[in-house]
Amino acid sequence: MSDETSSSHPVISIVAPAYNEEAILPELYRRTCQTLDALDLSWELVLVNDGSTDRSFEIMQELHAQDARVCIVNFSRNFGHQIAITAGADYARGDAVVIIDADLQDPPSLIADMVEQWRQGYEVVYAVRKQRQGETWFKLFTARLFYRLINRITGFQIPLDTGDFRLMDRKVVDTLRRMREYHRFMRGLSVWVGFRQTGVEYVRQERYAGETKYPLSKMLRFALDGITSFSHLPLQLATYLGFIIAGISVLGIIVAIILRVSGSQAFYGQASTLVAVLFLGGIQLISLGIIGEYLGRIYNEVKRRPLYVVRDVIGFEDEKAD
């Protein structure tokens, strides 16, 4: 590749966060080249090493030595998938930026369809999973449930059965770069900003190699980030529960008075009192936990720490993110 080509302004930036993906990175690069070279436009592949403990960073360096279009953002430690996406978008220089996972469940070949929609004037082109191969019924069920739940409790609609795999125009990326919240839900943020959006369907493949980096615990945390980032409904539920329980308590007092006057033995003893106290205590703890979750997020935001710390940047010359 000539120096002129390698230094030209990229039209498309492909951002791929990677955590312990040494077995996949060469194939990701091969498929990316195959797709983007056929489009006959300049491009760059921004690999974000999210604190990998295997040879991922070394392989990234080898790919950069082989092809200057491969650029690397190397974190000082693991900061998480959504933060890695953010860093990649911060450093990407293309007129359009494509976010794709490094595990090849999302096919790089679909980028050609995304670019076509972008050329037609759409500013966000998201990939819609019409079929998901190699995933358990539990994961499929919870994913469908989550998207339908979050669309009911937020003020905007996240397209069903989508992930982070999407193309965003430069004006969308620049808007997202100004949004520096700590707990990030990028697929929600990219919808929240608006602009002209459309989807392209595809069949999601099984992971090319390695193991998933999203076990159940991370999935739950990710879902919680999405809900609390865009909805106050959990806080409102605590209020609703308070009114409901207060109403039930008033009715209970009336029923207890009537039964006591009539001579019934139904409410004698400590069992009913103990159950009522435990029930009310549980509701109070749940409400405090919800409030604490929001307070913790506020605490993280007001500290104003950087979202990530970069150890090495390779392939961007003297450029750096704002």
Image (cartoon, grey):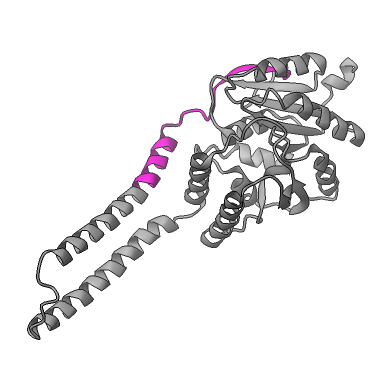
Quadrant of image for the C terminus: top right
**Residue 238 in magenta stretch:** no
Q: How many marks?
A: 0
* Quarter where residue 208 is shown: top right
Q: Is residue 37 left or right of residue 257?
A: right
**Residue 311 in magenta stretch:** yes
Quadrant of image for the N terminus: top right
Towards the viewer: 202 or 205: 205
Q: Is residue 97 left or right of residue 273?
A: right
> Residue 82's x, y, as percent?
58, 36
Q: Is residue 98 left or right of residue 50?
A: right
> Residue 141's x, y, as percent?
59, 55
> Residue 239's x, y, as percent?
33, 62
Give me the residue at 84% from left, 20% from top: 6
Give me the residue at 67% from left, 33% from top: 89
* Quarter where residue 59 is shown: top right
Say if 258 sits above or below 196 in the image.
below
Say if 119 sits above or below 309 in the image.
below
Residue 242 visible, this orientation = yes
Residue 40 visible, this orientation = no
> Residue 315's x, y, as percent?
73, 18
The segment highlighted magenta reads: 292-318
* Quarter where residue 26 is shown: top right
Towards the viewer: 154 or 220: 220
Towards the viewer: 195 or 289: 289
